[in-house]
Image (spheres, rainbow, N blue to C red):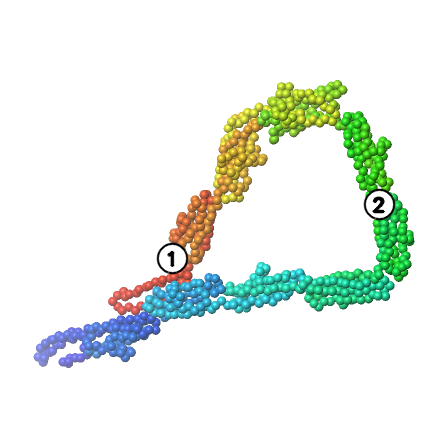
Amino acid sequence: TSPEITGLTAGSYTVVVTDAAGCTLSETVVIAQPPLLTLFLQPTDLDCAGDSDGAISSTVNGGTPPYSYLWDTGDTDPNLSGLTAGIYALTVTDANGCTVEGSALVDQPPSLQLEVQLQGNVCDPAGVTAAAIVNGGTPPYDYLWSTGDHSATLTGLFDGVYSVTVTDANDCTVSETIVIDPAPVIVVSIQSTDISCFGAGDGSATASASGGTAPYDYVWNTGEMTAAIAGLEAGMYTVTATDANGCFGIATVTIGEPAALTLEVSSTDASCDGSIGGTATAAVGGGTPPYSYAWSNGGSSATITGLSPGLYTVTATDANGCFLTASAEIGINNTLEASVEILNPPCAGSANGAALAVITGGTPPYDLMWSTGDTGMQVDGLSAGNYSLLVEDALGCQVVVEFDLIAVETPTCSIAITHPISVPGGSDGEVTVTASGGTPPYTYLWNTGGTNAVLGGLSEGVYSVVVTDANGCETSCSVSLGDPPAAKVGDKVWFDQNENGLQDPGEPGKGNVVVTLSGNDDQGNPLTLSTVTDAAGMYLFDPIPPGTYKLTFVLPQGYHFTLPNVGANDEVDSDVDTLTGMTTFFTLLDGDCILSWDAGIFIECVNVTNPGQIAGDEVLCGPGNDPGPIVEVLPPSGGVGALEYLWMKSTIGGPFNQNTWMPIPNSNTPNYDPPVIYQTTYYIRCVRRENCVLYLESNIVTKEVDSIAWAEIDGPNVVCVDEPATYTAAFGGANATYHWDFGPNADPQTADTPTAQVVWDGFGVATIVLTVVNDGCTATAVLPISISNSPIYCDDPGFTITAGPAGPEEVRVSWQAA
């Protein structure tokens, strides 16, 4: 209600003035205001963590210029630069004193961090692998090794100093240096024990390794894999010690052995009367001194003395317990010696031998005692046998001689029939005696009174002779002389399959054929004998008196006689007339043995006209397989009689002839199941009718042994997700086909080429299966693989995410790794 108002905000204001008369007047006024004072701050983040290259620019609108600026840093410029990471506040004041405040965050990327991880060791032939592991900064990263390489991982490194510098997308860098120490020296020492005795084989050796990284593995050149080995013979032994990292050292030791222990014993004899004792000395060599001695009489020194006659044994033992044993015989000085000169009895059983004593040494006079009881220097009237002589001298020393008397060899004799009796009842036999042994010349006395070595004009009987040698020693022998044997006739009836009149190999005999011998003996008496052939076709008439005879053969029904006398050999041709079945007449003498009267017979052959067909061709995958059976698909036809089969095989390809085919034993069957084969084999079936010779041949069946299919995969067993990998099949044969199966997560999942490229879309494990088919033979190879997304194995380029404002308002973006 006053004429003036203050503290107004912007807007429209109306005032009404009323005078005293009540008249009014109104007026409206608009109170204006400047535009809203606004502030927009645009920060520029740091390129690298810890840098001071950040900046903030300010934009002011509205209010009433000019503007003044005051940062919380004290700066009064509209814009700031050279900033480190942090939040900065600004207050802007316009000409009217209006203010606006704002703040901005100058951010920085995560600190670029580098770690180099090492795998493997320098003892591995593949060397050490160094992988640079980067965190922070702004991907992507560039790697620069001191070797000039630009990959995240280096392989095949050995001892040395290596450095790597990683630069991110903002050119921020970080470096790291690694030192790969050289391979440690593995020192191997060996403690050994030599062999105790020559050839004993009880040496030992123990290896001890130091340096490197325990534990250690030991391998000796003997194949043993322990630190200590025992039971060793003399020689050189080498051990290789390998530490936990594969570093190794080698050492050698020689196991020695002492020289072979030797022992010799020398001795001196004692006197017979005991006044002077004998000595024995052991001389030891080789082995390991010192030596100890153990004598059978209790002595313990190398030499023992005062010994009476006898056997003394010593055992010499060296420092290692090796020992030998030897003996010495202590005799008597001026040894009494005796021998016997003998005269053997001239004939076995006689008692006219003699023995004469011969004595030397000792002290006469001598006393003699023979085992016969005699006491003189000579004994007579001895027969063959064992004898002994005891001689004792004046000092009582004794010696015994044993000897044998052997009778002179007794003569022996044998009688040979030098001319047998020519006919039964004859007296023209002759025998001859032969003497040996004893003492020639010999005299003879036969039981007939004859005195010569040859005795003739003898008939059937037993003849004996007494033979006497020059010493009168006798022996006797005898012989039986008999009449000559009776005659015999026989031979064979055979089935002449090819009708050529000759007994060919393989042609069988014919049994149950009646054969009759008829004629007159040499006295004119008629004789008729009959027999039948056995299963082999053989017949025999025995005995037969001398005479003239013929043979008659009775043909079995349906058979015919083959042509006689084909060729000039009666042993293999037929001797029977084809119409009569008779032989010619022949004469037999005493003792004749005629086994050549043969008869060949045959039966008409009506053979097959069609051999039929067989089937069973197949291909086997490699040698050593069992083929399937060969079966008849069309039977033989034509002809009369039972069918006979013969299977043949050949491992030689055509052209085929009788030299390329080999018969299969026991194959008289229409079908045939071949055994396991190792090379391509051809089969044919031959067929004929019973009683026929010729076979007809079927078609040829081939069992082909083909080459074995081969499957082998060449490609990595560790791959990276979404990175292509190439796999190649080894050559599987000229006609091979290939099929790959890479699994459900692969692209492609299958392939049918020798080489295939494939990508997997997720990490894990998978199995690659390759199937190769070559000429019907199949082979399979399997390769398990690992699919990795590890940055150690896979070069990951990273990814970029960009965030921007979705409206006019200021947007602050903060990233956080999940």
Q: Is residue 14 left or right of residue 688?
A: left
> Residue at the spot x=19%, y=76% of the render?
65
> Residue at the spot x=49%, y=38% of the render?
653
> Residue at the spot x=55%, y=64% of the render?
250
Q: SS of the residue at dot 2? A: loop
**Picture quadrant where residue 133 is located:** bottom left
Residue 12: give x, y in percent of width and height.
16, 74
Q: Amino acid at mark 1?
A: Asp
Observer-nearest residue: 735 or 543? Answer: 543
Q: Disc 2 to disc 1, how far (Cα)? A: 112 Å
Q: Quadrant of the N terminus?
A: bottom left
Residue 365: give x, y in percent of width and height.
90, 59
Among the two numbered marks 2 and 1 on one chain, the one whose residue lies closer to the N terminus: 2
Q: In the rendered image, is residue 400 in sight?
A: no
Q: Quadrant of the C terminus?
A: bottom left
Observer-nearest residue: 333 or 794? Answer: 333
Q: SS of the residue at dot 1? A: loop
Q: Which residue position is annotated with label 2?
A: 407
Above or below, 214 relative to 21: above
> Residue at the spot x=71%, y=62% of the render?
262
Q: Amino acid at mark 2?
A: Ala
**Picture quadrant where residue 164 is located:** bottom left
Residue 303: give x, y in percent of width and height.
77, 66
Label at residue 722 = 1
